[in-house]
Amino acid sequence: MAGAAGLGLASPALAAPGDAAARGVVLDLVGDPGDESVQAEGTFGSVTAPAGGGTDDETSVDVTLADPENVVATGTVTEVTATRGPTTSSASSQLADFTLSVLDVEVLDVSELAVTAQCRAGNTTAGATGEDITVFGQQITIRDTAQEFTTGVTVTGLTDATLHAVVDRQLTGTPDNVIAINVRAVLSVSGFDGAEPVRFSLGQVILAEASCQSPSAAPPTASVIAPASGPQSGGQPVTITGTGFVPDATVVTFDGVAASDVVVVADGTSLSAVTPPGTVGPAAVVVTTAGGSAPALPYTYLADGTGAEVTGFTPREGPTTGGTTVTITGSGFTGATGVTFAGVTGTGFTVNPAGTTITVVTPPNPAGPATVEVVFAAGTANAGTFTYRAVAVAPSIGSLVPDEGSTAGGTAVTIRGSGFVPGRTTVGICGRTIAAGEVTVAADGRSSAFRTPPCAAGAVQVRVTTPGGTSNEVPFSYQADLPVTGASLRLPIAAGLTMLLTGGLLLLVARHRRQRLWQV
């Protein structure tokens, strides 16, 4: 004998409160192990309580098989009864002198068996008795957990064939219904077919079964629903307290629309449910069981976003380029469709099923504070403020004016470009760095000015550095014969020509091309 997992049993298939039924012997054996076929099907002794009340019974029903294959079964169903009363339903089954052989092996031998089932509202009982129960010739104590028994058997086409019987007793139910089976045996054959191990199911045998359901109970009562309001899109978890709620048999409706995920606690005094969508305004909440319906409770559907409450918001700042994942916590977010930052919709929006957490990725926006709003189908809910930080950008040089100067240094140079930062811009030239305090930057950051340091004649590279990085390099030419530039005087002398006197040089400028004519 070896232990086996519990077989499990479905709830009794009862049509209405007060139903009761009983069966004596149920054979459902069909299988083809090896070259043999096993077949024996039939129910012996079967009654159902009358729908209008009263008792149905059968007595002294012989177990006689029609066209069995490799199965022999004999015995007597002594009595089966089923009764429906105004407050109680009940059923019972009794069996005597039952034997079952399969493939010429005696599987079961029972002297007497009996089961009973009784159901009142909220109170069910079941019992079983049995004497001299043997499996494969071995007397056993039947249990509500499955036991597996085995014995050798001869099956053409199989070597090392074994007949298995997994046996248990089932007494299961709820406060309102119950099913009882005295002996249940599931049979199979295993062996080796010459190529690999095989196992064939043969079906099952039920001995003495009774089931019932409680008659109609009093209607439930409902006293409180919490919360008493929620979004019109539904999805709001609520809890209802009262009495007489039935597990797996209670319906909750909001203005006639069924709630989902209804779960009743074991003692029937409270339940949880999830609201369906509704129309803005009051709604009647009705709890219904087989016993009837409770008086309606009031519930109010709110325009989406009205019930939203933000309790947390993190992080509260990020770069102007966007891309920051923000988490908003609170309640009433069910039905939200998105989040905006200063009117710009974020991406990657999600809201958890409970409506308590939102995640969203910030869109790009200008530097500064941005109002954050949770968007619903019928409005918005303010979630606070997110601060965008300016992102430092590397500077860029477009041109130098002038782009040459004296080796003695002191040439005033204007750099045109972008990204220059007042007070935080340095210039690199001739292996030296002109400090930020000696560099003048325009307010728009598009030009800066400095004076060149002394340097040997030749071309050097000029670059600008700010907190955003370092710019491209632009050439500047040092010339030994050029004086230091200072104040200059421009004098027009003819159409298209200008005479420029600057720092000891006299230049003619024509159509933006400068020619050095002479030095004075």
Image (cartoon, rainbow, N blue to C red):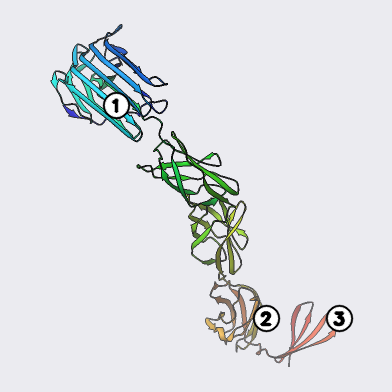
Where residue 189 appears, as percent x and y from the top left, is 24, 19
The disc, 2 or 3, on the residue closer to the chain's N-terminal end is 2
**Going by the image, does 55 lie left or right of 136?**
right
**Going by the image, does 47 lie left or right of 158?**
right
Q: Which residue is mark 3?
A: 495
Residue at screen point 42% across, 27% down: 16
| Foreground residue among 122 and 397 | 122
Q: Residue furthest right?
A: 495
Q: Are marks 3 and 1 in contact (CB under 8 Å)?
A: no
CA gap, disc 3 and disc 1: 122 Å
Badge 2 crowding class, 10 Å Cα cut-off, few under 14, some 14 to 19, many 20 or more, is some
User: Identity of the amino acid at label 3?
Assistant: Ala
User: So how many labels did they put on this image?
Assistant: 3
**Going by the image, does 312 lie left or right of 105?**
right
User: Identity of the amino acid at label 1?
Assistant: Ala
Q: Secondary structure at mark 1?
A: strand
Residue at screen point 36% across, 27% down: 12
**Going by the image, does 84 lie left or right of 111?**
right
| Foreground residue among 17 and 315 | 17
CA gap, disc 1 and disc 2: 108 Å
Q: Quadrant of residue 22?
A: top left
Q: Which residue is mark 2?
A: 402
| Foreground residue among 294 and 520 | 294
CA gap, disc 2 and disc 3: 24 Å
Q: Is residue 140 above or below residue 342?
A: above
Q: Residue furthest front?
A: 86
Q: Quadrant of residue 365?
A: bottom right
Q: Which residue is mark 1?
A: 117
Q: Secondary structure at mark 2?
A: loop
Foreground: disc 1 or disc 2? 1
Where residue 52 appears, as percent x and y from the top left, is 42, 21
